[in-house]
Amino acid sequence: MTTRRLTRRQRLARTAAVAAALLASVVVAVSLLGGTSAPLIPPTQHVSASLAAHRASASPGAGAGAGTALDAAMFADGSCVAFAPTSGNRHLTVFLDAGHGGPDPGGQGVTLRGTTIDEAQLTLPVVLDATALLRAQGFRVVDSRTTASSVVRLRASDLAGSVFSLSGLHRDVAARAVCANLAGAKALVSVHFNVGASAANAGTQTTYDAVRPFAAASLALATAVHTAVVAALRAVPSWHVPDDGVVTDNQVGNSLTAQGAAYGHLLLLGPASAGFFATPSTMPGTLTEPLFLTDPFEGTVAAGAQGQHVIAAAIARAVTAFLVPAGH
Ligand SMILES: [Zn+2]
Protein backbone atom coordinates (compact mmCIF):
# COMPACT_ATOMS: atom_id res chain seq x y z
CA MET A 1 0.00 0.00 0.00
CA THR A 2 1.03 3.54 -0.41
CA THR A 3 -0.21 6.95 0.53
CA ARG A 4 0.87 8.47 -2.78
CA ARG A 5 -1.74 10.78 -4.15
CA LEU A 6 -2.13 12.37 -7.52
CA THR A 7 -0.87 15.87 -8.04
CA ARG A 8 -3.44 18.52 -8.87
CA ARG A 9 -2.24 18.47 -12.46
CA GLN A 10 -2.62 14.70 -12.73
CA ARG A 11 -6.05 14.94 -11.13
CA LEU A 12 -7.17 17.49 -13.69
CA ALA A 13 -5.85 15.37 -16.55
CA ARG A 14 -7.67 12.37 -15.17
CA THR A 15 -10.85 14.29 -14.63
CA ALA A 16 -10.78 15.18 -18.31
CA ALA A 17 -10.11 11.55 -19.26
CA VAL A 18 -12.89 10.35 -16.98
CA ALA A 19 -15.30 12.87 -18.45
CA ALA A 20 -14.35 11.76 -21.97
CA ALA A 21 -14.80 8.10 -21.05
CA LEU A 22 -18.17 8.71 -19.44
CA LEU A 23 -19.28 10.79 -22.40
CA ALA A 24 -18.21 8.00 -24.73
CA SER A 25 -20.18 5.54 -22.61
CA VAL A 26 -23.25 7.69 -23.06
CA VAL A 27 -22.58 7.87 -26.80
CA VAL A 28 -22.31 4.08 -26.93
CA ALA A 29 -25.49 3.70 -24.93
CA VAL A 30 -27.30 6.12 -27.18
CA SER A 31 -26.05 4.35 -30.29
CA LEU A 32 -27.17 1.02 -28.87
CA LEU A 33 -30.61 2.58 -28.44
CA GLY A 34 -30.73 3.44 -32.09
CA GLY A 35 -28.59 6.58 -32.28
CA THR A 36 -26.46 7.08 -35.34
CA SER A 37 -23.20 8.61 -34.13
CA ALA A 38 -20.15 6.39 -34.32
CA PRO A 39 -18.89 5.95 -30.74
CA LEU A 40 -15.36 6.58 -29.62
CA ILE A 41 -13.91 3.53 -27.95
CA PRO A 42 -11.91 4.59 -24.91
CA PRO A 43 -10.19 2.07 -22.63
CA THR A 44 -13.40 1.87 -20.60
CA GLN A 45 -15.09 -0.01 -23.38
CA HIS A 46 -12.62 -2.86 -23.16
CA VAL A 47 -13.87 -3.89 -19.75
CA SER A 48 -16.70 -6.22 -20.62
CA ALA A 49 -14.85 -7.71 -23.58
CA SER A 50 -11.85 -8.35 -21.36
CA LEU A 51 -13.88 -10.04 -18.67
CA ALA A 52 -15.52 -12.25 -21.27
CA ALA A 53 -12.13 -13.10 -22.76
CA HIS A 54 -10.83 -13.81 -19.27
CA ARG A 55 -13.62 -16.28 -18.63
CA ALA A 56 -13.07 -17.89 -21.99
CA SER A 57 -9.35 -18.23 -21.33
CA ALA A 58 -9.71 -19.53 -17.80
CA SER A 59 -8.21 -22.83 -18.83
CA PRO A 60 -4.59 -23.83 -19.37
CA GLY A 61 -4.15 -21.90 -22.59
CA ALA A 62 -1.26 -19.52 -22.01
CA GLY A 63 -0.67 -19.13 -25.71
CA ALA A 64 -1.41 -22.47 -27.34
CA GLY A 65 -0.15 -25.86 -26.29
CA ALA A 66 -1.08 -27.64 -23.10
CA GLY A 67 1.20 -27.24 -20.14
CA THR A 68 2.73 -29.88 -17.91
CA ALA A 69 1.78 -30.06 -14.25
CA LEU A 70 4.92 -30.14 -12.10
CA ASP A 71 3.30 -31.87 -9.13
CA ALA A 72 -0.35 -32.84 -9.48
CA ALA A 73 -0.54 -34.03 -5.88
CA MET A 74 0.61 -30.79 -4.29
CA PHE A 75 -0.98 -28.28 -6.65
CA ALA A 76 -4.56 -27.71 -7.77
CA ASP A 77 -5.61 -28.73 -11.28
CA GLY A 78 -4.20 -26.15 -13.71
CA SER A 79 -1.75 -24.81 -11.12
CA CYS A 80 2.05 -24.96 -11.16
CA VAL A 81 2.11 -25.71 -14.87
CA ALA A 82 5.13 -25.57 -17.19
CA PHE A 83 4.95 -24.33 -20.77
CA ALA A 84 7.70 -25.00 -23.31
CA PRO A 85 9.02 -22.22 -25.55
CA THR A 86 7.05 -21.70 -28.76
CA SER A 87 9.95 -20.20 -30.69
CA GLY A 88 13.61 -21.13 -30.20
CA ASN A 89 14.84 -22.29 -26.82
CA ARG A 90 16.97 -20.23 -24.47
CA HIS A 91 17.04 -23.03 -21.87
CA LEU A 92 15.92 -20.53 -19.26
CA THR A 93 12.78 -20.74 -17.13
CA VAL A 94 10.68 -17.83 -15.90
CA PHE A 95 8.21 -18.24 -13.05
CA LEU A 96 5.10 -16.07 -13.28
CA ASP A 97 2.63 -15.80 -10.42
CA ALA A 98 -0.91 -14.51 -10.81
CA GLY A 99 -1.63 -13.12 -7.36
CA HIS A 100 -4.49 -14.58 -5.28
CA GLY A 101 -7.08 -16.98 -6.74
CA GLY A 102 -9.52 -19.64 -5.58
CA PRO A 103 -10.90 -18.76 -2.15
CA ASP A 104 -8.81 -15.57 -2.16
CA PRO A 105 -10.17 -12.84 -4.46
CA GLY A 106 -7.47 -10.38 -3.38
CA GLY A 107 -8.20 -6.68 -3.27
CA GLN A 108 -11.43 -5.31 -4.65
CA GLY A 109 -12.05 -2.18 -6.67
CA VAL A 110 -14.39 -0.59 -9.14
CA THR A 111 -14.28 0.68 -12.70
CA LEU A 112 -15.53 4.05 -13.94
CA ARG A 113 -18.72 2.33 -15.02
CA GLY A 114 -19.28 0.90 -11.57
CA THR A 115 -18.28 -2.68 -12.29
CA THR A 116 -16.83 -4.38 -9.22
CA ILE A 117 -13.46 -5.94 -9.98
CA ASP A 118 -11.21 -8.15 -7.93
CA GLU A 119 -7.51 -8.67 -8.05
CA ALA A 120 -7.45 -12.43 -8.63
CA GLN A 121 -9.60 -12.00 -11.73
CA LEU A 122 -7.26 -9.40 -13.27
CA THR A 123 -3.82 -10.77 -12.42
CA LEU A 124 -4.55 -13.98 -14.36
CA PRO A 125 -5.00 -12.52 -17.88
CA VAL A 126 -1.85 -10.42 -17.41
CA VAL A 127 0.14 -13.53 -16.49
CA LEU A 128 -1.32 -15.65 -19.30
CA ASP A 129 -0.52 -12.91 -21.80
CA ALA A 130 3.04 -12.48 -20.49
CA THR A 131 3.44 -16.27 -20.58
CA ALA A 132 2.66 -16.39 -24.29
CA LEU A 133 4.99 -13.46 -24.99
CA LEU A 134 7.89 -15.00 -23.08
CA ARG A 135 7.39 -18.43 -24.66
CA ALA A 136 7.61 -16.73 -28.05
CA GLN A 137 10.91 -15.23 -26.89
CA GLY A 138 12.31 -18.73 -26.30
CA PHE A 139 11.69 -19.08 -22.57
CA ARG A 140 10.13 -21.98 -20.72
CA VAL A 141 7.48 -20.46 -18.46
CA VAL A 142 6.00 -21.95 -15.31
CA ASP A 143 2.79 -20.34 -14.09
CA SER A 144 1.66 -20.65 -10.48
CA ARG A 145 -1.91 -20.89 -11.75
CA THR A 146 -3.63 -20.86 -15.13
CA THR A 147 -7.22 -20.88 -13.91
CA ALA A 148 -9.31 -19.07 -11.31
CA SER A 149 -8.39 -21.66 -8.68
CA SER A 150 -5.98 -21.72 -5.75
CA VAL A 151 -2.36 -22.75 -6.34
CA VAL A 152 -2.13 -25.34 -3.57
CA ARG A 153 -4.42 -28.35 -3.80
CA LEU A 154 -6.97 -27.49 -1.13
CA ARG A 155 -7.72 -29.62 1.89
CA ALA A 156 -10.48 -29.03 4.39
CA SER A 157 -8.31 -27.16 6.90
CA ASP A 158 -7.35 -24.61 4.22
CA LEU A 159 -10.85 -23.18 4.27
CA ALA A 160 -12.91 -21.22 6.75
CA GLY A 161 -16.30 -21.26 5.08
CA SER A 162 -15.81 -20.01 1.53
CA VAL A 163 -12.54 -18.19 2.20
CA PHE A 164 -9.06 -19.29 3.19
CA SER A 165 -8.25 -20.06 6.77
CA LEU A 166 -5.06 -18.32 7.92
CA SER A 167 -3.14 -21.57 7.56
CA GLY A 168 -4.69 -22.15 4.13
CA LEU A 169 -3.63 -18.73 2.88
CA HIS A 170 -0.14 -19.36 4.20
CA ARG A 171 0.00 -22.73 2.46
CA ASP A 172 -1.23 -21.26 -0.83
CA VAL A 173 1.43 -18.52 -0.92
CA ALA A 174 4.15 -20.89 0.28
CA ALA A 175 3.16 -23.29 -2.51
CA ARG A 176 3.94 -20.57 -5.06
CA ALA A 177 7.53 -20.38 -3.81
CA VAL A 178 7.75 -24.18 -3.92
CA CYS A 179 6.49 -24.10 -7.50
CA ALA A 180 9.08 -21.49 -8.50
CA ASN A 181 11.80 -23.69 -7.00
CA LEU A 182 10.47 -26.86 -8.66
CA ALA A 183 10.47 -24.93 -11.93
CA GLY A 184 14.16 -24.18 -11.67
CA ALA A 185 13.27 -20.61 -12.59
CA LYS A 186 15.94 -17.95 -13.04
CA ALA A 187 13.48 -15.14 -12.36
CA LEU A 188 10.24 -14.86 -10.37
CA VAL A 189 7.63 -12.22 -11.18
CA SER A 190 4.45 -12.00 -9.15
CA VAL A 191 1.64 -9.87 -10.54
CA HIS A 192 -0.74 -8.13 -8.15
CA PHE A 193 -2.80 -4.97 -8.13
CA ASN A 194 -2.91 -2.50 -5.29
CA VAL A 195 -5.80 -1.23 -3.20
CA GLY A 196 -5.87 1.94 -1.15
CA ALA A 197 -7.84 3.48 1.67
CA SER A 198 -8.82 6.28 -0.69
CA ALA A 199 -9.78 6.45 -4.35
CA ALA A 200 -6.96 8.99 -4.63
CA ASN A 201 -4.32 6.33 -3.98
CA ALA A 202 -2.81 5.64 -7.35
CA GLY A 203 0.24 4.52 -9.23
CA THR A 204 2.70 1.72 -9.93
CA GLN A 205 4.71 0.16 -7.12
CA THR A 206 7.19 -2.70 -7.36
CA THR A 207 8.61 -4.71 -4.48
CA TYR A 208 11.67 -6.86 -3.83
CA ASP A 209 13.28 -8.43 -0.76
CA ALA A 210 16.53 -6.81 0.33
CA VAL A 211 17.89 -9.48 2.69
CA ARG A 212 18.20 -12.47 0.38
CA PRO A 213 21.67 -13.51 -0.90
CA PHE A 214 20.53 -12.51 -4.41
CA ALA A 215 19.02 -9.18 -3.32
CA ALA A 216 21.09 -7.19 -5.82
CA ALA A 217 19.73 -9.28 -8.68
CA SER A 218 16.21 -8.98 -7.28
CA LEU A 219 16.59 -5.20 -7.18
CA ALA A 220 17.79 -5.24 -10.80
CA LEU A 221 14.79 -7.36 -11.82
CA ALA A 222 12.37 -5.18 -9.82
CA THR A 223 13.82 -2.04 -11.33
CA ALA A 224 13.60 -3.47 -14.85
CA VAL A 225 9.96 -4.50 -14.38
CA HIS A 226 9.02 -1.26 -12.66
CA THR A 227 10.66 0.97 -15.25
CA ALA A 228 9.09 -0.96 -18.13
CA VAL A 229 5.58 -0.97 -16.62
CA VAL A 230 5.64 2.73 -15.73
CA ALA A 231 6.95 3.68 -19.17
CA ALA A 232 4.43 1.48 -20.97
CA LEU A 233 1.46 2.83 -19.03
CA ARG A 234 2.60 6.41 -19.53
CA ALA A 235 3.04 5.81 -23.26
CA VAL A 236 -0.74 5.59 -23.58
CA PRO A 237 -2.17 9.09 -24.03
CA SER A 238 -4.30 10.20 -21.04
CA TRP A 239 -3.06 7.43 -18.74
CA HIS A 240 -1.28 9.48 -16.09
CA VAL A 241 -0.13 6.75 -13.75
CA PRO A 242 2.03 7.97 -10.84
CA ASP A 243 5.39 6.32 -10.17
CA ASP A 244 5.30 5.00 -6.59
CA GLY A 245 8.78 3.54 -6.88
CA VAL A 246 10.60 0.32 -6.09
CA VAL A 247 10.32 -0.59 -2.42
CA THR A 248 11.52 -3.38 -0.13
CA ASP A 249 9.02 -5.97 1.02
CA ASN A 250 9.17 -4.92 4.66
CA GLN A 251 7.34 -1.75 3.57
CA VAL A 252 4.33 -3.45 2.01
CA GLY A 253 3.45 -6.12 4.55
CA ASN A 254 -0.21 -6.81 5.17
CA SER A 255 0.30 -9.52 7.73
CA LEU A 256 -2.78 -11.01 9.27
CA THR A 257 -0.99 -12.49 12.26
CA ALA A 258 1.57 -11.38 14.83
CA GLN A 259 3.88 -14.10 13.53
CA GLY A 260 3.52 -12.74 10.00
CA ALA A 261 4.14 -9.20 11.18
CA ALA A 262 7.26 -10.32 13.04
CA TYR A 263 8.45 -12.06 9.87
CA GLY A 264 8.43 -8.71 8.05
CA HIS A 265 8.70 -9.97 4.46
CA LEU A 266 6.46 -11.09 1.67
CA LEU A 267 6.32 -14.87 1.91
CA LEU A 268 6.90 -15.31 -1.82
CA LEU A 269 10.10 -13.24 -1.81
CA GLY A 270 11.41 -13.48 1.72
CA PRO A 271 13.76 -15.80 3.62
CA ALA A 272 13.07 -18.92 5.65
CA SER A 273 12.02 -18.36 9.24
CA ALA A 274 12.17 -21.08 11.87
CA GLY A 275 8.74 -22.40 12.78
CA PHE A 276 7.01 -20.09 10.30
CA PHE A 277 8.30 -20.64 6.79
CA ALA A 278 10.63 -23.37 5.52
CA THR A 279 10.51 -23.20 1.72
CA PRO A 280 11.62 -19.77 0.46
CA SER A 281 12.01 -19.01 -3.23
CA THR A 282 15.59 -19.42 -4.35
CA MET A 283 15.88 -17.04 -7.31
CA PRO A 284 15.76 -13.27 -7.94
CA GLY A 285 12.18 -12.14 -7.56
CA THR A 286 9.86 -9.18 -7.66
CA LEU A 287 6.21 -8.41 -7.04
CA THR A 288 4.64 -5.76 -9.23
CA GLU A 289 1.49 -3.77 -8.53
CA PRO A 290 0.97 -1.80 -11.73
CA LEU A 291 -2.26 -0.02 -10.73
CA PHE A 292 -4.68 0.68 -7.88
CA LEU A 293 -8.02 -1.07 -8.31
CA THR A 294 -9.60 1.35 -5.84
CA ASP A 295 -8.92 4.27 -8.18
CA PRO A 296 -11.78 3.92 -10.70
CA PHE A 297 -9.59 5.26 -13.49
CA GLU A 298 -6.78 2.80 -12.82
CA GLY A 299 -9.29 0.04 -12.10
CA THR A 300 -10.73 0.59 -15.56
CA VAL A 301 -7.30 0.33 -17.14
CA ALA A 302 -6.54 -2.82 -15.10
CA ALA A 303 -9.82 -4.42 -16.15
CA GLY A 304 -9.35 -3.63 -19.82
CA ALA A 305 -7.68 -5.79 -22.45
CA GLN A 306 -5.47 -2.90 -23.54
CA GLY A 307 -4.21 -2.18 -20.04
CA GLN A 308 -3.60 -5.86 -19.32
CA HIS A 309 -1.65 -6.28 -22.55
CA VAL A 310 0.42 -3.15 -21.98
CA ILE A 311 1.41 -4.49 -18.55
CA ALA A 312 2.07 -8.04 -19.82
CA ALA A 313 4.25 -6.84 -22.66
CA ALA A 314 6.23 -4.59 -20.32
CA ILE A 315 6.83 -7.50 -17.93
CA ALA A 316 7.93 -9.75 -20.80
CA ARG A 317 10.33 -7.11 -22.12
CA ALA A 318 11.80 -6.50 -18.67
CA VAL A 319 12.28 -10.19 -17.90
CA THR A 320 13.92 -10.76 -21.27
CA ALA A 321 16.28 -7.84 -20.71
CA PHE A 322 17.08 -9.13 -17.20
CA LEU A 323 17.81 -12.72 -18.25
CA VAL A 324 19.40 -12.13 -21.63
CA PRO A 325 22.27 -9.65 -21.68
CA ALA A 326 22.06 -7.15 -24.52
CA GLY A 327 23.35 -8.54 -27.81
CA HIS A 328 22.64 -12.21 -27.03
ZN1 LIG B 1 -2.39 -8.81 -4.07
Image: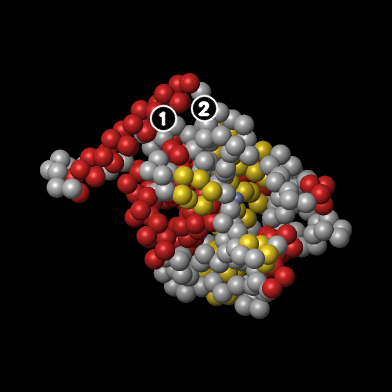
Residue shown at 39% from the left, 28% from the top: 15
**Element class at badge 2:** loop
Quick check: can you spot residue 184?
Answer: no
Amino acid tagged 1: Arg
Q: Nearer the viewer, residue 284 or 323?
A: 284
Q: Residue 140: where, in percent of width, then height?
A: 54, 65
Residue lying at 35% horizontally and 53% vertically, measured from the top left: 48
User: In this orientation, which residue lies closer to the viewer: 181 or 155?
Assistant: 155
> Which of the 4 quarters of the picture holds residue 143?
bottom right
Amino acid type for the residue under numbered disc 2: Leu
Percent across and percent down for residue 328 are 52, 53
Horizontally, residue 319 falls left or right of residue 239, namely right
Characterize the local packing of mark 1: few (<14), some (14-19) or many (20 or more) Cα atoms within 10 angstroms.
some
Instruction: From this view, report whether residue 139 is shown above or below residue 253.
Output: below
Q: How many marks?
A: 2
Q: Cβ(mark 2) to ligand 1 < 8 Å?
A: no
The answer to whether mark 1 is within 8 Å of ligand 1 is: no
Read off the residue under disc 1.
14
| Residues marked 1 and 2 touching at CB (< 8 Å) | yes
Q: Which residue is mark 2?
A: 6
**Residue plotted at (35% across, 28% down):** 16
Where does the N terminus fall, quadrant-wise? top right
- Toward the top, the furthest residue is 8
Compared with 269, 158 (above or below) is below
Q: CA distance from mark 1 to mark 2?
A: 9 Å
- Residue at image position (49%, 53%) is 122
